[in-house]
Image (cartoon, rainbow, N blue to C red):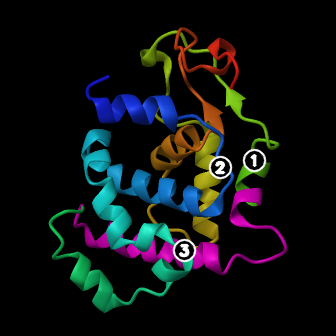
Amino acid sequence: MSSATMQRYHDEEWGRPEHDEQRLFELLCLETYQAGLSWQTVLNKREAFEQAFHHFDIATVAGMTPQDVEQLLTNAAIIRNRRKLEATVNNARVILNWPGPDHFATWLWAFVDNRPIRHQFTSASEMPGTTDLARHISREMKKRGFKFVGPTIIYSFLQVAGLVNDHLMSCDWAPENRQGD
């Protein structure tokens, strides 16, 4: 791994099944900010994002105003991209106002029948940038009003949230190599 932060992220978060709505929202936001940048850059700014977005509290972020976005554009500690900032507020509103009896997390996990998809990759070069599943979920999210959720972002989101487990077969953190988890 390129840094201790990246190693910790890999070992403690990436590919671990996540069902908590607020955590899913946070992971979706971080993937949005990663678009066009390195993941290391996002991880380095993660704490600042947590502060700027009130620890990714969905209701609080959904209540942010255009003036709040303008203020965030002056915050050098975060990635200052107006479209990404506006997408974060928009996406919080979509999740907060989720229609029907199910929640966002339930809806999302239904795409994989509530079981992570385990790929059998032996090399990072085998990992795709996106998949048909990610393209499908991206389309469905856009229909529901989400912004900045293209198929590449969604595939990365599925990986980090554990809906897709792309740990290499040789990785100590692959489920089949874990003892006692």
Q: Of the residues under marks 2 and 1, which one precedes in the sequence? A: 1
Residue at 47 percent of width and 68 percent of height: 56
Residue at 64 percent of width and 71 percent of height: 144
Residue highlighted by disc 2:
136
| 23 drawn magenta | no
Residue at 24 percent of width and 62 percent of height: 78
Q: Which is in the foreground here, disc 3 or disc 1?
A: 3
Name the side, left or right, on which 110 lies relative to 145: right
Give coordinates of residue 71: x percent, y percent: 23, 83
Give coordinates of residue 129: x percent, y percent: 46, 33
In the rendered image, the vertical position of residue 106 relative to residue 11, given as above or below: below
Residue at 63 percent of width and 68 percent of height: 143
Q: Secondary structure at mark 2?
A: helix
Q: Which residues are magenta?
A: 79-106
Residue highlighted by disc 1:
111
Residues packed near mark 2 inside 10 Å, few (<14), some (14 to 19) or many (20 plus): few
Q: Of the residues under marks 3 and 2, which one precedes in the sequence? A: 3
Where on the picture, by quarter, is residue 121? Answer: top right
Q: Is residue 123 visible?
A: yes
Name the side, left or right, on which 102 lies relative to 33: right
Q: Amino acid at mark 1?
A: Phe
Asked whether disc 3 touches disc 2, contact meaning CB atoms under 8 Å apart, the reply is no
Q: From mark 3 to mark 1, how far is it between C-alphas?
A: 22 Å
